[in-house]
Image (spheres, helix red, strand yellow):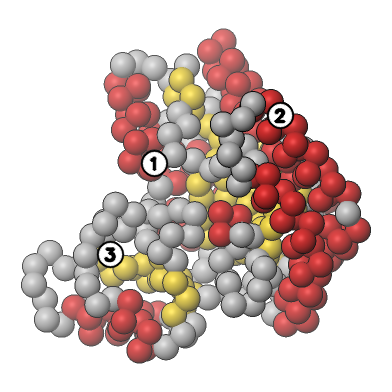
Amino acid sequence: MAINRCESRWRAMQASSMLEGLGKRVINPSGVEALCGSKIETAKIWMKNGLDVPKWVFVPFPKAQDGLWKERVLTQMEEGLSYPLVLKPTHGSWGKGVQKINSREELLAAIQEPQASSINPDGFFAQEYVPKPGFDLRILCYKEPFHTPKYLCCIARVTRSKDEFRTNTHLGGLPLGIDLHRFPVLVREAEEASGLLQGSKDASIIALDAMPYTNDEKDESLILSLVQNCIPRFEQVRKIVAENRMRRYADWKKDLEEAFKAYKASEEYKDLKGAIESILSRARVKWHEANSRFDFAINTRNATGINPAYTYLDLAQGATTS
């Protein structure tokens, strides 16, 4: 049994495929890597099975010179979506290349060159803009061989300002540990969404991104107000993360964990978490992405108190004996 933790989407898929070709079982299998690596395929599967997903439009790159291609992109996107909309790479992560498009002029500027890239090899993928209340959810689910998926842990990712609609912690979003067991409907939906991507046979562990929405602007105003008080606390964590890790790792890890404990123990953190949980008690969610190569070593592990590394090991040991 092999555990595949390649950061690169392409390397992860190649590694799983090569190991499977040698008769090895892998966490995650190549089929799971392929589905989670494609926003289009993920959206298709979820939509087909009745999950609430953002409306989306995909326009493939032209195979030859096409003078009408830009006009076709505009027509299809404006017929399927309204402004603002979100333009995304089909295979990207960490918020790379994600743009909020507010007008036809901005869309025209964004699609000037139909050029394939490693994170966007297929075409232009756009989703409806969902007005989040200042945060979204990153939910981890795991699956043992021949079992249905189970919820593992969850963080809320909170943006720092109204000007930044992306909540990725890589871009400065604040992580807060949320126990979804308090929201059983969300847990059931997460396990269903996860199962549609993980299949039935092999062990795997993936992260799902869900966007809560309430259609109440007061919720966003409250979260953006509370997060300002929390930012100075979290900056102490980020300061340690940014330090040179060439010093003794054990000391660095201890300092990071202590900083996270202080951050989570602060009244500012508790106030923000309480507001998020109150919103989740009445919000609906849209499922929009899955990630098979999620980072957990810093934010997820410390914010939730659950270390997914142990889940990887438990799955590998269970798969080896099954």
In this view, which residue lies farthest toward the left?
65
Name the one closer to the observer, 58 or 131: 131
Q: Quadrant of residue 140?
A: top right
Name the disc covering residue 123, or none.
Answer: 3
Label 3 to label 2: alpha-carbon separation: 46 Å
Kind of residue indicated by mark 1: Ser
Name the residue at 69% across, 80% down: 215
**Residue 223 at what x, y percent from top left?**
77, 71
Find residue 276 and report its image quarter: bottom right
Identify whether 145 is placed above or below 64.
Answer: above
SS under mark 1: loop
Classify mark 3: residues with Cα within 10 Å, few (<14), some (14-19) or many (20+): many
Q: Amino acid at mark 3?
A: Gly
Mark closest to the chain's N terminus, 3 or 2? 3
Q: Which of pointers 2 and 1 indicates the residue nearer the eye? A: 2
The residue mark sitting in front, 3 or 1, is 1
**On the picture, is 322 further left or further right than 267?**
left
Mark 1 neighbour class, 10 Å CA radius: few under 14, some 14 to 19, many 20 or more: few
At label 2, which amino acid type do we have?
Asp
Q: Is residue 185 visible?
A: no
Residue with the mark numbered 2: 251
- Label for residue 274? none
Residue drawn at 58 percent across, 39 percent down: 244
Badge 2: how crowded within 10 Å, few (<14), some, or many (20+)? Answer: few
Q: Check whether the beta carbons of the residues at disc 2 and disc 1 lie within 8 A of each other.
A: no
Label 3, label 1: how far apart the Cα atoms are: 20 Å
Secondary element type, mark 3? strand
The answer to whether residue 137 of the structure is visible from this angle is: yes
